[in-house]
Image: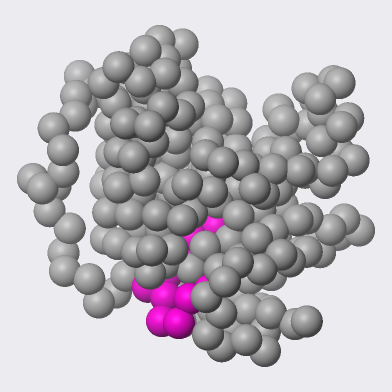
Amino acid sequence: MSTTTIPELTASMFIQIPVGSQLLNGRLVLGREPRGLVIIVNGDGDHIYDATNAYVADHLARSEFATLIVDLLTPNEAVEDAETSALRFHQGLLASRLVRITRWVRARLAFSGLEIGVFASGLCAGAALAAASVSGDIRAVVCRGARVDVVVPQLHNVRGEVLLLVGERDTAHVDASRGAYWLLPEGARLEIVPNAGHLLEDADALGLVSREAERWFTRTLDRDAEQFSMEEAPSVPMPV
């Protein structure tokens, strides 16, 4: 069944996206009158139903955003990566696939009137920032526990508006995220989430991540939304 023939899809739908000779797995929810499209990326080949990203996707869908959870690796590549850890660090590969996915979405799913954002975690967040440095289609990026250290040279070229969410207890990446914050274009925001670890996976942190992602994408993707006020955001330690 072609996704392009369903104007008011409200249930989730499995799709496959061609990227070169490969097919990447995805799960799509369009909604009736979406405020924007959020692509939620995984670095695995079999985790489009990952519980953490599914939680964020469900929150955004309930907030009337179209969502596309997509794996940047095929299942076979995921098996290889589990043994070698090589592909997860191949930021060029992951970023280029995300750019191609964004182009495919524009061409095949009739989203020409919607702004596109990306939600990504860990190494995929680095790839999302790299993709946003070369793609004008990516309007906004929200990074959860980002590995920004792997894409520092690309940060000053990022075109989309960026929100970095980092756990306070993620000492390995807090300083890197602070450094990345100053390299990103004006308008970027960094939030250090109190008492949270690297991927902010506990219930309280994940709830905050979902709400902040919704706020960020509302401000950056929804043309009809009221102007976002930074004063309304929760009090979170900022970089010094």
Question: Viewer-proximal residue, 204 or 43?
Answer: 204
Which residue sits at x=37%, y=12%? Answer: 169
The quarter in which the N terminus is drawn is: bottom right
Residue 151 visible to an observer of this rendering: no
Which residue sits at x=45%, y=82%? Answer: 32
Q: Is residue 64 above or below residue 125?
A: below
Question: Viewer-proximal residue, 24 or 205?
Answer: 205
Magenta-drawn stretch contains 228: no
Picture quadrant where residue 162 is located: top left
Residue at the limit of the structure toward the left, as seen here: 231
Q: Is the magenta stretch mostly helix, strand or loop?
A: loop
Q: In this view, does 219 lie above or below 157?
A: below
Residue 152, image x, y percentages: 51, 29
Which residue sits at x=68%, y=38%? Answer: 43
Residue 204, image x, y percentages: 32, 31
What are the residue bounds of the magenta stretch? 30-39
Which residue sits at x=78%, y=22%? Answer: 85
Picture quadrant where residue 171 is located: top left
